Image: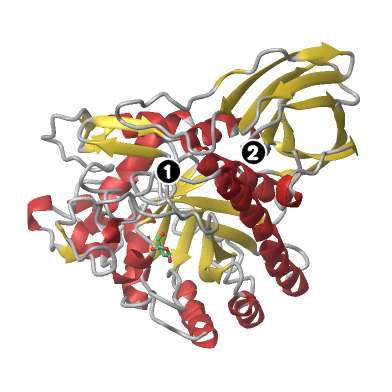
Amino acid sequence: MKAIMITKERGPQISRHVYGHFSEHLGRCIYNGGYWVGEDSPIPNVRGIRSDIVEAMKAIRVPNIRWPGGCFADDYHWRDAVGPREERTPIVNVHWGGVLENNHFGTHEFMDLCEQIGCEPYICGNVGSGTVREMRDWVEYLSDDGQSPMAQLRRKNGRDRAWKIHMFGVGNENWGCGGFMTAEQYAMEFRKYATYIKNYEVMGKMNWWEAPDILKIAGGANAENTEWLEVLMRSVPSSLMKGVSVHCYVKPGEESSGTSFSDDSWYQTAVNTLKKEDAFLENLKIMDRYDPEKKVIMAVDEWGIWVDNEPGTNPGFLYQQNTMRSALCAALMLHIFHRHADRIRLANLAQTINVLQSILLTEGDRIVKTPTWHVFDLFKGHQDAESLMTVWENGPDIIEKGLPHVELSASVKEGRMTVTLVNLSTETNADIDIEVPDALPASASGRVLAGRPCDHNTFDDPEKVHSVPLEGIHANGHTLSVTLPPCAVAALDIALA
Ligand code: AHR
């Protein structure tokens, strides 16, 4: 029996925004089965937005959605997608499949989606092919409650009250699809663009240099490219740049099929996911050097496992299945975010519906919750909770490829403790004693998601992978004993006396 003690030492708060999602105009995320079905669709919808998707996202308390890209963001011109839908200018999605989009899902529809879900918008503006004025005007359009030309235009288009905008991305991957810029060049562009992103909520109520700012997030690089981050940290003051994005895609090793692989790929995915922490640490070191007070956040605003597209689907649509291996990647990555909660304050899983590591798959009027959706459901107690230090007293055992048998994370909020655990072994149960010092667990319950690494949900078998109550939790004084089945992700909800 291995023991773990959860110390009373409290770490930083885990921002709920690390549980964010990313929805790009890509494949079938927005159109063709995604959020937007239109008001006349037989699929139940509210103002054209699919209700089953909204309900599934509300259930896991999605805190924010990043939109409209991705690569798409730097080719997106927001004015083409506001006003009467039949008059909107279509756009060819040059990055993803070359499809013609009618722009019926634009600013108003995205903000409506966020309001229906009860989450915050995290809009990414166009630097690659846009202008400073276009971005400045978009922010005014969204958030000015006054008499500005953009506020008037918004009212003409049917929305009286301004929306609240607390975070804004200034371009995406501008080293690549966002304009192929050098880091130095982008840093200069960022300074210019960010200057004109204003907080209209407080405008006129205080001097702008004293006003609370919008969280302006610079487009970042992949976690391994620290040079880009270093240039940004060196070249842009924290008064302008409130966050830097870092992208982090995990490959499953040589066996990249979405549904058919050996247990070795499960272990390799765990290794590859945990290795990302080293990459984050390199980035964090740089950030600490330039910003020891941690004023600038790290936003991992694209992350997830990237496997093969499903056979027979449009290669530009990135439609991928989602297995217990995907759930493993999600659980381990969320634990990494918890461990660096003082700096990683925003993260967005790529990409919500029918694209990459989706939480939902759709086909016609049918919807499937993926194993990854279940991880977000199990982990939701961590949102905005204080992280807790965990220390092994004896353990964990080391299994294949030098991996720990069990990996875990703990937090506390309003007298309840959430402990999430991963059993990384595909063969062996894990018995664990969890010591909760200074508080007696008054009651504890748990849920567990388990299966074989390849298990996944399909439209014919949508409940093959789902969470069930974790039986056999024993409390003895300050100690809780649990047994996890192999290949499992679990969550304990502990009420403290
Ligand atoms: O998520 C798919 C693509 O991956 C995004 O559009 C881009 O930012 C990244 O390279």
Residue situated in front as seen by the camera: 434 or 125: 434
Q: SS of the residue at dot 2?
A: loop
Q: Earlier in the sequence, mark 1 or mark 2?
A: 1
* Labels in figure, total: 2
| Residue 101 against residue 447 in the figure, above or below | below
Q: Is residue 101 left or right of residue 288?
A: left
Q: Amino acid at mark 2?
A: Asp
Say above or below: 276 vs 54.
below
Q: Badge 2: how crowded within 10 Å, few (<14), some, or many (20+)?
A: some
Q: In the rendered image, which residue does mark 1 sit on?
A: 259
Quadrant of the snapshot with the N terminus: top right
- Residue drawn at point x = 7 percent, y = 53 percent: 86
- Residue 453, image quadrant: top right
**Badges 1 and 2: C-beta atoms under 8 Å apart?**
no
Q: Quadrant of residue 26?
A: bottom left
Residue type beneath disc 1: Thr
Rate crowding at label 1 as few (under 14), some (14 to 19) or many (20 or more) other CA atoms within 10 Å: many
Residue bearing the label numbered 2: 384
